Image (cartoon, rainbow, N blue to C red):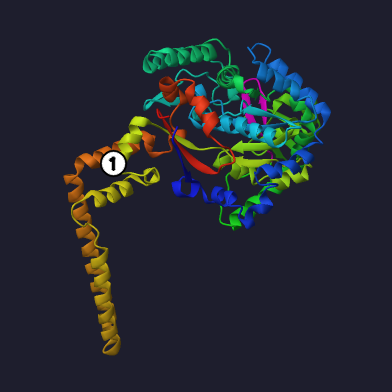
Amino acid sequence: MPTECIPYKETNYFTDLTLDYLAEKEELKSFYNRFPNLENFKAQIEEKSSFPQENRKVLVNALQEQYSGLEISEATQKNIKALENEETFTVVTGHQLNLFTGPLYFLYKIVSTINLTQKLKEKYPENNFVPIYWMATEDHDFEEINFFNLNGKKFQWANAPENAERDAVGNLSTHGLEDVFKLFSAEIGGGKDAEFLKELFKKAYLEHDNLAEATLFVANELFKEEGLVILDAQQKSLKELFIPYAKNELLEQISHKTTTKTAEKLNDLGYNVQVNPREINLFYLNNGLRERIIERDGEYFVHETEIKFTKAEILEELQHFPERFSPNVMLRPLYQEVILPNLCYIGGSGEIAYWLELKEYFAAENVIFPVLLLRNSAMIQSEKLDEKRRKLNISNKELFLKQHELINRKVRQISNIDIDFSKQKEHLVKQFQQMYDLAEQTDKSFIGAVKAQEVKQLKGLNNLEKRLLKAQKRKLEDEVSRIAELQNELFPNKALQERQTNFSEIYAEYGPELISVLLKELDPLQAEFKILTFGKE
């Protein structure tokens, strides 16, 4: 399969913070522990070897309970069992419970995680490495997860549960997804691979009671042979391990104190801060409700409810019902590292950005900070689209230009007349320089008049150039249309394909080859954007 790599910087889709992190800029080094290269994992393994054996037992029991009703592969079973062993470590990625996985990068995150565990095993054969998908079951951003895009159409969960906006999404009933299934079945068509997708959707969402169970089923079906272990951390036994840290959050508000300072440092360096911490970064989760906890004058209130606690009462509630205390985006990373023998977190640009706010918080809580790795990014194109691209003489790198820039560049290239007035503008500037010199020697009051005339004439040339370009676009309308059509297919809604398109669109055409190719081609330690062309050997 032909592949091409493009430096992230040249795609124009990645933030300065991400690019500077990948470049190992000196000013960012204090915000993370170790940079993600294979050699650095040796020290990370040694440091994480202090992970408590008791926590391993709790984790394995929780996973076995979670998987009890599921058909489990030998590889996954082996990986869960291996977590009891002190020589076993995890690599984690996390993702929301998007309907039918949501956008394509769900797959890229998990493939990056699986592939990194294999690279680590080759480098450190004396250890075991388990890929973990952390399901964000405690989120409540229903609007972000209740749809997916297929063939340019939006398939949305319209008949959502009444408490969809207030409860943790993992708890939501799958009732109401029958209509989505009918529409999806009609759109995806027939054939062996389409039938697999229909059956996958049906079994996941129409035969499971809630979104957490449905998502677990989908991810397990797609990646069980690779030994992926899927974790729903919304379990009492796991939350019990987090009690001391939740207590610190309620009483000391350590996360706010530490991350606020870090956010200020990042701001001072010119970076946009991804998440601004609250004073208490815990939610209260109970009876279909997930609302933030606020402390006021020594008492604790659950936002927009009548629920309130004294200090003694909330600590007692935490002790007896730790599952009712849900970490937000600032605390979830700490919770993850407390319950997992984890070496590395793999995430997208936004995730890496908020993790970079957390190192001081981890230090204050005496929890080891993991290696942070940017997930793989890719674009998938068919052989047919690749052929169109080459006929239009567009490089893969040029595809990442803004559409008007790409069209203007190509029109200039294929036009039989010169539409670039750069030489004329240069000649004009030189002529006016002579006039400036003349004004300097005679009457300086004329300098303003000379400048006004120069601006006017340069503006005139610019307008002529634009009119000529516009005329050529009309003349070359067919080529312009084909260029726009090609780019629109590869960049739906003028965004990266991986952030728009659902995996089913590509799976329906290529079947299991989609996942096998991703596993073969995506190297988690190769920090470049990959273009994969399907249909060629």
Q: Is residue 372 visible?
A: yes
Q: Find the magenta span and give its range.
A: 280-293
Query: Residue sitting at 68 percent across and 44 percent down?
Result: 358
Q: Amino acid at mark 1?
A: Leu
Q: Quadrant of residue 280?
A: top right
Question: Quadrant location of the N terminus?
Answer: top left
Q: Position of residue 422 (x, y in %)?
A: 27, 64
Q: Position of residue 451 (x, y in %)?
A: 28, 75
- Residue at disc 1, secondary structure: loop
Near-viewer residue (393 or 64):
393
151 up-or-down from 41: above or below: above
Question: Quadrant location of the C terminus?
Answer: top left
Q: Which residue is mark 1?
A: 392
Query: Residue sitting at 29 percent across and 51 percent down?
Result: 409
Predominant secondary structure, magenta span: strand
Magenta residue check for 507: no
208 up-or-down from 473: above or below: above
Decide if residue 380 is on the left or right side of residue 259.
left
Furthest-bottom residue in this view: 442
Near-viewer residue (182 or 194):
194
Q: Position of residue 311 (x, y in %)?
A: 79, 34
